[in-house]
Image (cartoon, rainbow, N blue to C red):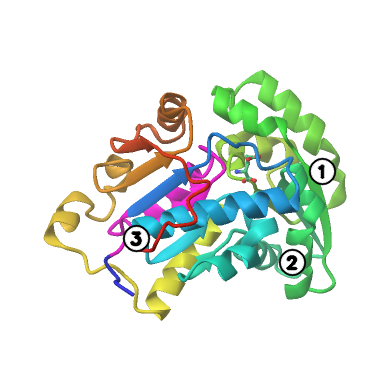
Amino acid sequence: MDRNLPIGIFDSGVGGLTVYRALHERLPTERYVYLGDTARVPYGTKSLSTVERYAIENARFLVSRGIKLLVVACNTASALAVPAIRAAVPVPVVGMIGAGARAAVQAAAGSARVGVVATESTVKSGAYSKAIKALAPGTEVYERACPLFVALAEEGWAETEVARVVAEEYLGELRGLNVAALVMGCTHYPILRRVIQEAVGAGVRLIDSGEAAAAAVEALIDREGLRRTATQELRDLREAGAHARHLCDDLDHFYVTDAAERFAHVAERFLGAAPRRLEAVEVWGQDELQPR
Ligand code: DGL
């Protein structure tokens, strides 16, 4: 495996940019190839077989571009499709669930109650509950779907009164449950971090599954000897602490399956920068795609 290949990331759409940002912060000298399946978003209400099919097509597309490992940024695809993706592609695959669950168990530090907020399909899968209970068997896991958070984040309404009312409606009941940690198990939810924290109370530790997965990716590339050997060009561009300026720069490549203009617009809202290299592609019906 060529350690200088980029890291592939896919999501159902634009939300996975929060995971891209977390990876970029932790591993600024890596390069990234991102695919947002904007033609088929949302995944969070879809069935297992559909999410598996979409996820495999996305994964194969990214492998055809040449990547050294694949990050499944979409929590729904991580909850439903990681075994199918692993069977379909020849690169290491990192999903959100294991990393998010581990971080929550650590943060809860022996407390019996952990919360998870995610899409309907992620909650229905029970993937986070299973992963948390496998690590800490006595834990009670409270899971709640919060579908309106996705629209609020994309609309740029994360800090509004509307968002506060919605967060209170979804999460107010959590305050009485003595939950020690809450996993934000959906790509978009970190954008609403402030209102989520307000709704659950300051005593609850919020876990960003993307940040947890970025730490898992760093551990994996070090274990497997896959860390990019930074060229001078990369060092100059992405010296430590300067990552924010280099989000979405020419070194990272973004693909979408539809509506590139809207993707760029929401990317700017989420990251403060729009991708410079952004292309619309089709990822379905391309069984002939070969790894580069
Ligand atoms: N990316 C999805 C997730 O993290 C949220 C958006 C969708 O439903 O596709 O689960």
* Quarter of the figure that contains the N terminus: bottom left
| Mark 1 to mark 2 CA distance (whole Å) | 20 Å
Picture quadrant of residue 288: bottom left
Q: Mark 1 — residue?
A: 175
Q: Image check: 240 left or right of 233?
A: right
Q: Mark 3 — residue?
A: 66
Q: Position of residue 7 (x, y in %)?
A: 38, 59
| Label 2 secondary element | helix
Q: Which of marks 1 and 2 is nearer the N terminus?
A: 2
| Mark 3 to mark 1 CA distance (whole Å) | 46 Å
Marks 2 and 3 in Cβ contact (< 8 Å): no
Marks 3 and 1 in Cβ contact (< 8 Å): no
Q: Residue 26 colored magenta?
A: yes
Q: Which of marks 2 and 3 is nearer the N terminus?
A: 3
Q: In this view, does 291 lie above or below 251?
A: below
Q: Where is residue 134 in the image (x, y as percent from the top left)?
A: 76, 74
Q: Image check: 27 left or right of 285?
A: left
Q: Which of 122 and 136 is in front in this view?
A: 122
* Amino acid under disc 3: Gly
